[in-house]
Amino acid sequence: MSARSASTPPHAPQTPASKNGRSRGPVDFAGVDCRNHWLHHPVYGDPSWDAFRHSPGNPVHRGSAGLEWPVNGFLFRDPVSSDWYAYIGNYPARYEHGQGKSSICTVSRSRDRGGSWEHLGPVFPEVPFFFDGFSSRVAYAPDVTVACADGLYHMVYDWATEDSSWQNVRSYRSGFAYAWSERPEGPFHRCPTPLFHNGLIPKDGIFRRYDRCYASSLVRRRSDWLILTLIDAGHHYAWGLVAFTSDNPRGPYSGPEPVLHVESNRFHPPLMEYFPAFTHDGWVYAPATSVALNRNFQIVHRAPVEKATDPDAWELFQHGSVWHAADKEHEAAGIWGQTFSGFVDDREHFQVLFPSKDSNDIGTINFASRPWTEQYAPRGFRISGHKGPSLALLLRTCDAFALDCTFTLTGSATLFWGNNAPLGADRPASDSSLHELSSPGGSGLQFLENSWRLLDLTRPRTPLVLASGPLSQQSERTLTLGRSADGSAFIVIDGDRLWEGALPAEAGSLGFLVAQDTRLSVERFVVDGCPSHGGYTLLHTEALLGAGQGLAGWDEVSSPMFRYGVGAVHKADGGRGKWNFFGTGFRLWLPRGPEYGTVRVLVDGRPAGQPALRRKTPSPSQPVLTVENLPEGFHAVVLTAGRGLVLDSIDVACSTLDRFPAQGTWGARGDQPHAAPPPPAG
């Protein structure tokens, strides 16, 4: 190996000879047309092409002593005056309950389309308020939504009593209620009885687990009123959206009716919190943000407003690339709270309020906008690490390749290649992050503030430094990297040829691992040598997350019987696993043994097979079911068993060109492929 300077090579380097000969020529994977060639996931990360422009006047509000976390909000355009109103949910730090604690909603107004804001104070009079029949006053009422109709401003707001705590809040001590005003700034007059308290949640169906409603959106429909409310399942770490309806905004309301949740057998990303919803052109949109550690992934579901109580009317409108965090101190935490709130204005621009936190853990309220019809920028993606790392993982397999990349970086990021690590969360819970098995393998080029390091990532927890050196201070960098089938490689950074030598030539994926407190913006990512298809593997924790299982009733087992040395076994009857993925097929790996039974497999709600796992003698995990030729798109694989449900891993095919090889990345085949099940009704 040697390090030396040289002139800059051609902008599009020659492709090294590939062992498999499947190259499709140079492709710029930083173009938005390649967006679905990258992984977008609630835990692992989300390279985003979103077109939002953040307001230069941000933040417009920061937390203060006692109300350190203004981390939710609702943005409202008054149809009468055309003024904008920001209803801000102000919480104590860490959502603390207890003596002397409270949370309130304040309102701010802009008369110049968000150019400046006037703080108007609390929406409710600061006097003790008791619901009829309650002995404890309402002390927590932070989150609201407002609708204008019949000359009044109608509000639905969250509430909890002063004697509530995180131990008893799933009861009559919390819920949502109604208030009204003649002006959007208030004062709002609260009805003497709440619309709903959590002691009224039924105990059947999904409500055997989901037992707390909060964060409600009020929507006026043609002939009735709709409330869409976030509901959660506590230590199962599952969230959903339920609907209530009434002929009168004051109630009474029917419901709750489940519309979105992980209990469905359809694709539904885990860890998503919805609030607030908005309407446009006859649709109701429900944005949601992941509550994994990194807080940098969002989705948007939508349904026709008049059909919003029908679960089958909802569709996934955006999955990932919804949002990016600007490289600003007041956006240190990404989106933190629920998610953005907005409306489409008379110029067809999507105006949004979004919450974050600064580097001192103080909440901030901010604004951004984009043309409604321009969801994505034509090129260049951004990915950020906040309280945890993020992966920008290209779902294409390369052995010999050439890469030409232009990027800007604040913090630390590692470009990796030859990676075959499985993907999974470190735990099936909120604040989850990458599993230790998911640290990228292969080789890596780490960029620090003013230096670089070439790494052997064969053992990711203890990477071996093969070479290193300084870099000039500059915001934008260029990188040209090439690797041939025989392992010979070279690295050119900012026009200087800094290294050449030999590296392992194992086929695998490329991408960036973005460290905590890092922002990466990639303008160019031209790869010559990658085929047009690839695949990846999902661990058991993904199935636990996808089914909202938590670890209640499960044992995580370390054993050589599992493919990667770890899996999960349900300790009693029941249990459910669910892998969500974007692709065209999968291969299911499970061990066999005397404690296991027959597993029932559903694909998008349709039966796909019943592998029998009971054996007198335990045998290591192997493929038990393969499904190919699914339509390219979002799919869900659900596993259930009468007793002894076991979860290991699945391989995902990303393209209809993919086939599961007899040897290679995904191991020995050992099974017979099955035809795709028929598509679900509707």
Image (cartoon, helix red, strand yellow):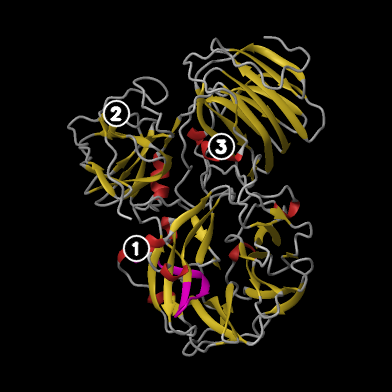
Q: Under tag 2, what secondary structure? A: strand
For this orientation, the residue located farthest to the right is 473
Judged by depth in the image, the label closer to the viewer, 3 or 2, is 3
Asked if one can make out residue 218 in the rendered structure from this viewpoint, the answer is yes
Q: Are marks 1 and 2 in contact (CB under 8 Å)?
A: no
Depth check, front residue: 639 or 18 = 18
Say if 666 sits above or below 269 in the image: above
Q: CA distance from mark 1 to mark 2?
A: 35 Å
Tell me if residue 220 is in the magenta stretch: yes
Q: Which residues are magenta?
A: 207-227
Q: Is residue 24 left or right of residue 555?
A: right
Say if 165 sits above or below 383 in the image: below
Residue 658, image x, y percentages: 40, 29
Q: Split into 4 quadrants, where in the image is the N terminus?
A: top right
Residue 602, image x, y percentages: 28, 46
- Type of amino acid under label 3: Cys
Q: Is residue 180 left or right of residue 593?
A: right
Q: Under tag 1, what secondary structure? A: helix
The mark that comes first in sequence, 3 or 1, is 3
Q: Which numbered tag is attached to residue 620? A: 2
The residue indicated by pointer 3 is 34
